[in-house]
Image (cartoon, grey):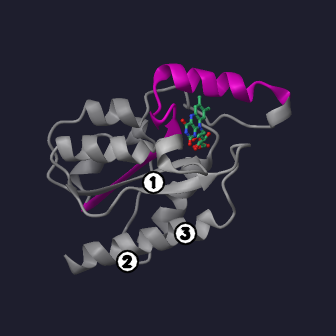
Amino acid sequence: MYGNTHHVADAIGAGLGTAFDVRVVPVSLAGPEVLAEADLVVVGGPTHAHGMSRAATRKAAVEAADKPAGGLKVEPGALGPGLREWLEALGQYPVKAAAFDTKMHGPAALTGRASKGADRLLRAHGFDVVAEPESFLVTRQDRLDPEETSRARDWGARLAAIIAAS
Ligand SMILES: Cc1cc2nc3c(=O)[nH]c(=O)nc-3n(C[C@H](O)[C@H](O)[C@H](O)COP(=O)(O)O)c2cc1C
């Protein structure tokens, strides 16, 4: 919604890009032709209401950004279908995959983790999940913690090593 997950996706892509050709796309552009040529699919989304976003939570996010105090900008296409809808509409894909999310600080039992639900849907659609779901942290003001960019790059590089070894 606010660009944090997009930024983390770019950083993971940079880590993977040390070894592989990478495309970072929003779900609206991740059609079957993108999946057909992928050795690894890494999916991510923001944590909303303890899980993956829904139309209602995306609407709430836009409304929250309309308040002048926060200074948040909404990304183009943010109200469109999210990761949940994209995963639910997929057929079976026996492709390697991993899931991440962005979420607030705090134990997952309190904040929830969108990546847990994404991981579950990946497995339900036949993906071969190669890593535990990973979370990257935002502040209460919805800003990515500065150290998360390099952690995301490192996670991407670790995924690249897993794929290279398999
Ligand atoms: C409607 C709404 C619900 C949210 N619910 C949660 C939540 O349950 N747990 C949590 O950790 N963060 C929650 N957040 C914070 C989001 O995780 C955070 O805004 C997001 O990670 C920022 O990423 P983005 O810039 O890609 O949207 C919520 C945010 C919004 C707007």
* Ligand 1 within 8 Å, label 1 CB: no
Mark 3 or mark 1: whose residue is earlier in sequence: 1
Horizontal side, residue 85 vs residue 49: left or right: left
Query: Horizontal and vertical percent for residue 85?
Result: 35, 29
**Residue shown at the point (46%, 42%) measured from the top left:** 26
Determine contact: label 1, label 2, CB under 8 Å: no
Specify whether residue 84 is in view.
yes
Q: What element carries label 1?
A: loop
Give the labeled residue for mark 3. 151
Horizontal side, residue 39 vs residue 111: left or right: left
Residue 125 in the magenta stretch? The answer is no
Estimate the spatial distance between the alpha carbons at disc 3 and disc 1, rounded to whole Å: 17 Å
Give the labeled residue for mark 1. 24
The magenta region covers 39-68
The amino acid marked with disc number 1 is Val
**Residue shown at the point (20%, 47%) measured from the top left:** 123
| Nearer to us in this view, 137 or 68 | 137
Q: For label 2, count other residues whose C-alpha is less than 10 Å away and answer few (under 14), some (14-19) or many (20+).
A: some
Q: Quadrant of residue 79?
A: top right
The amino acid marked with disc number 3 is Arg
Give the labeled residue for mark 2. 19
- Taking the image as four quarters, which one is ligand 1 found in? top right
| Mark 3 or 2: the one toward you | 3
